[in-house]
Image: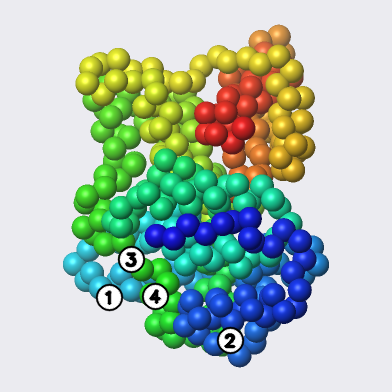
């Protein structure tokens, strides 16, 4: 696999000639000539590029369209597979991980116009890891988190074709299927254990109880993994099933640092954890990363006035999606929010965000 250089992506406004050439190149990659070139230009414009309409609306459509197109394909291709396994197959084929690898394979990032230099580093790191992998499709999350921007590009281009075809889903699949190859098959799922199944098996072996909770934040589903009542990790996605897999993959990586699978030792990496001035430090970190400021929410307010207990969550909207963390139970709201901020900072450090 050739490694492209992400720094060649537009970090400053490209000329009309450069964008016209990008349109031609991407048309060659997907094998489709657009009637309305503006759609593809929009699909290749990141929200950080303020001089033109971004791909956000197209990405919204593309997420749903690819999910439906893949669902139709799987339904027809595997008539003997039940709903549960079809759902896992679909999730594997439209996950951020899968679509990001599609973008790397076709070097789509180099055609994106954006004004966010941090994207270059994230994409370069992911690309270098993917280039060293075997050709067998990786169904679930690898050693480096897939940048969401890569999946967004694939979804946006698919949506642009779909709209240009006057919303013809069958024609879209005929044109775009080769871009998504290799399609994840039931055999691929068998060779690579499903993270959710693996997590339950590992925890059951060590006598631990796993609970996965869900809620929605605007357009996203958020899943959080709890082991013996203690928060371990969370993940988000437009699709509930993908959010669950993302959360569980993070949980497995965190738990692997605290347990040895060949004996009975097992310790959840949670519990009380305190960083002095964590709220201010997290706020400063978000400003440095150009993320939205943290949003705190008190989830629990119980007991009489002199023994009230509070639990706070904190959410951060990053380039890759919404991150959520739940703090420890505290007697004061201020301490509850600081606990959530402390755990969020540690999670960001462990996940290589900072």
Q: What residue do we see at 34% from left, 42% from top?
A: 195
* Marks 1, 2: nearer the viewer: 2
Alpha carbon separation for disc pair 1 and 2: 28 Å
- Disc 1 crowd rating (10 Å Cα; few below 14, some 14-19, many 20+) is few
Q: Is residue 12 depicted above or below 117 in this figure?
A: below
Q: Position of residue 262 (x, y in %)?
A: 22, 21
Q: What residue do we see at 26% from left, 62% from top?
A: 185
Instruction: Read off the residue under disc 2.
Output: 34
- Disc 2 crowd rating (10 Å Cα; few below 14, some 14-19, many 20+) is some
Q: Earlier in the sequence, mark 4 or mark 3?
A: 4
Return the mark for residue 182: 3
Q: In which quarter of the image is residue 300?
A: top right
Quadrant where the C terminus sits is top right
Q: Earlier in the sequence, mark 1 or mark 2?
A: 2
Return the mark for residue 139: none
Q: In which quarter of the image is residue 303?
A: top right
Q: Position of residue 103 (x, y in %)?
A: 49, 63
Q: How is the image coloured?
A: rainbow
Q: Is residue 329 depicted above or below 354 in this figure?
A: above
Instruction: Read off the residue under disc 4.
Output: 177
Q: Is residue 165 depicted above or below 88 in this figure?
A: below
């Amino acid at each position: 696999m050739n490694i492209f250089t992400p720094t060649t992506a537009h970090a400053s406004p490209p000329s009309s000639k450069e964008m016209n050439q990008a349109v031609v190149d991407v048309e060659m990659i997907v094998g489709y000539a657009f009637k309305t070139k503006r759609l593809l230009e929009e699909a290749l414009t990141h929200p950080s590029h303020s001089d033109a309409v971004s791909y956000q609306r197209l990405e919204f459509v593309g997420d749903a369209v690819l999910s439906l197109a893949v669902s139709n394909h799987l339904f027809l291709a595997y008539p003997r597979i039940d709903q549960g396994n079809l759902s896992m197959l679909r999730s594997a084929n439209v996950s951020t991980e899968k679509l990001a690898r599609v973008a790397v394979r076709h070097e789509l990032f180099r055609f994106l116009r954006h004004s966010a230099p941090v994207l270059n580093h994230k994409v370069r790191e992911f690309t270098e890891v993917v280039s060293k992998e075997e050709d067998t499709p990786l169904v679930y999350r690898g050693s480096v988190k897939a940048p969401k921007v890569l999946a967004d590009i694939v979804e946006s281009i698919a949506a642009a074709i779909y709209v240009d075809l006057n919303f013809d889903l069958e024609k879209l699949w005929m044109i775009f299927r080769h871009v998504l190859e290799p399609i994840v098959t039931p055999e691929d799922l068998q060779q690579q254990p499903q993270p959710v199944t693996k997590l339950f098996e590992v925890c059951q072996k060590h006598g631990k109880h796993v609970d996965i909770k869900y809620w929605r934040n605007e357009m996203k589903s958020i899943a959080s993994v709890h082991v013996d009542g203690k928060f371990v990790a969370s993940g988000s996605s437009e699709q509930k099933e993908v959010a669950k897999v993302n959360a569980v993959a993070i949980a497995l990586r965190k738990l692997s640092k605290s347990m040895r699978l060949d004996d009975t030792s097992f310790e959840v990496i949670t519990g009380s954890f305190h960083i002095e001035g964590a709220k201010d430090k997290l706020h400063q970190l978000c400003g440095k990363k150009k993320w939205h400021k943290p949003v705190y929410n008190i989830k629990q307010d119980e007991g009489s006035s002199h023994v009230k207990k509070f639990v706070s969550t904190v959410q951060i909207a990053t380039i890759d999606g919404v991150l959520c963390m739940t703090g420890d139970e505290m007697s004061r709201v201020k301490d509850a929010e600081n606990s959530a901020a402390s755990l969020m900072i540690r999670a960001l450090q462990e996940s290589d965000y900072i």
